[in-house]
Amino acid sequence: EVQLVESGGGLVQPGGSLRLSCASSGFTFSSYEMNWVRQAPGKGLEWISYISSSGDNIYYADSVKGRFTISRDSAKNSLYLQMNSLRPEDTAVYYCARGGVGATFDAFDIWGQGTMVTVSS
Amino acid sequence: QSVLTQPPSASGTPGQRVTISCSGGNSNIGSNYVYWYQQLPGTAPKLLIYRNTQRPSGVPDRFSGSKSGTSASLAISGLRSEDEADYYCATWDGSLSGWVFGGGTKLTVL
């Protein structure tokens, strides 16, 4: 079964750091571009970061640029999001989502169940 | 304020046809594919339409997508109670170098 499972969410103080992980299974992880998308409580979806299959192409939303870092480890079939200098407005459910093959900027066809990040003192 | 504009709400009765619009600009919808996602309450989003008009396997043909210029639409025919969900359009924006989502449309089946 093709699956993505996020972990690493939790409660963190403003200014703190957190590292999210997304474990993949059931497909050739190294062939696919990956994304992180978040959803604040009661709000819509917000794309925050993209990484190509090779890891050579990386993009961030302006809201997280300079604070968040996306990475991937094909040996572990995993995607990561290092979040630093966290703010209350970063409070959201964070989803990892599979994109297309290579660097095609294609559909998010597989989504994880999400992990909740709460930034509060 | 989302780059892509969707109506915040839509509604219909069972069996009816409803459409949800998504308006953007030349750097996003005007030059890239549009995708639609369905999010049922309390669940992760699910891909509904890809590359403007294509349905993934398992998505009923009651759902259809279209695109013209800098706008796109999702149509749902034969509305059913289980279609009650939030719907989001999305596309790549070349000027922003990132994906953009619409603000979402909450569909209510009366």
Image (cartoon, coloured by chain):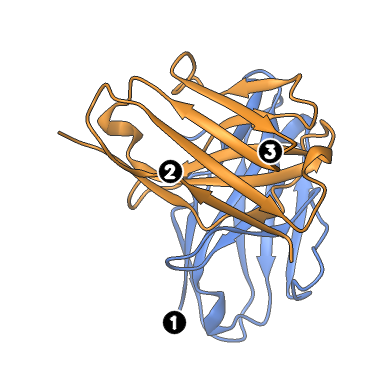
Chain colours: A orange, B blue
**Quadrant housing the N terminus of chain A:** bottom right
Which one is nearer the viewer's eye here, A68 or A24?
A24
The image shows residue B38 at horizontal and vertical percentages of 59, 62
Q: Nearer the viewer, mark 1 or mark 2?
A: 2
Mark 3 falls within which chain? Answer: A
Residue A8: which disc? 2
Residue located at (76% from left, 19% from top): A56
Q: Nearer the viewer, mark 3 or mark 2?
A: 2
Q: Amino acid at mark 1?
A: Leu
Report which residue position mark 1 lands on: B110
Q: Residue at x 79, y 32 (%)?
A: A53
SS at mark 3 in the image: strand
Q: Residues within 10 Å of mark 3 (few under 14, many from 20)?
A: many
Q: Nearer the viewer, residue B43 or A70?
A: A70
The residue that disc 3 covers is: A34
Q: Which amino acid type corresponds to the residue marked 2 in the rendered image?
A: Gly
Q: Position of residue A102 (x, y in %)?
A: 85, 34
Sequence order check, earlier mark of 3 and 2: 2
Quadrant containing the C terminus of chain A in the rendered view = top left
Residue drawn where x is 29% and y is 27% of the image: A87
Q: Secondary structure at mark 2?
A: loop
Asked if the residue under mark 3 is in contact with the one under mark 1, i.e. CB atoms within 8 Å, the reply is: no
Q: Position of residue B58 (x, y in %)?
A: 77, 73
Disc 3 + disc 2, Cβ < 8 Å: no
Q: Is residue A34 left or right of residue B31?
A: left
Spatial CA distance of label 1 from label 3 is 37 Å
Up/down of A87 relative to B73, above or below:
above
The residue sitting at the bottom extreme is B14
Chain for disc number 2: A
Assign a secondary structure to mark 1.
loop
